[in-house]
Amino acid sequence: MLESIDIAKFLSAFVITIFLILSVYYIFSRYGKNIISLNQKGDIKIKDMKFLGKGKNLLFIEVKDKEFLLSVDEKEIKVIDKWDISEKNRHIEDTPEKHSHLD
């Protein structure tokens, strides 16, 4: 038969294990995206990702001087749209600002 000290050791080890698992889960769920984005040093950067359903995602990525909106499912990856970053910035700079004048 188990002694009370053995039961106390088991329960304390069990509680510590559950606490560690929940702590790791919390850290990755809260800061996981930032950890992944900090490790991106190459030419491909994932700017945003949206989960749409089981095995379906939208990705907004940057590759060198282009941005892509991708649809990803279990069978294929489709390019929905793409932009040239320099053209996008030029378009933003050329857009006239709206000013309100009170006379």
Image (tube, rainbow, N blue to C red):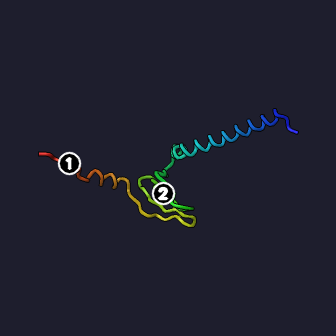
Q: Which amino acid does label 1 sit on?
A: His
Q: Outermost residue, bottom direction?
A: 75
Q: In this view, does 50 lie above or below 36?
A: below
**Horizontal and vertical percent position of residue 48:** 47, 52
Along the line of sight, the residue nearer the viewer: 32 or 20: 20
**Horizontal and vertical percent position of residue 2:** 85, 38
Residue topped by disc 1: 99
Q: Is residue 82 left or right of residue 92?
A: right
Q: Which amino acid does label 2 sit on?
A: Leu
> Dot 2: few (<14), some (14–19), or many (≥20) neighbours within 10 Å?
some
The quadrant of the rendering that contains the N terminus is top right
Q: What residue lies at 52% left-to-right and 64% top-to-bottom?
A: 77
Mark toward the viewer: 1 or 2: 1
Q: What residue lies at 42% left-to-right and 56% top-to-bottom?
A: 67
> Dot 1: few (<14), some (14–19), or many (≥20) neighbours within 10 Å?
few
Q: Outermost residue, left direction?
A: 103
Residue topped by disc 2: 59
The quadrant of the rendering that contains the C terminus is top left
Q: Outermost residue, top direction?
A: 5
Q: What residue lies at 20% left-to-right and 48% top-to-bottom?
A: 99
**Horizontal and vertical percent position of residue 61:** 46, 54
In the rendered structure, which disc, 1 or 2, sits on the residue that comes first in sequence?
2
Q: In this view, does 13 lie to the left or right of 65?
A: right
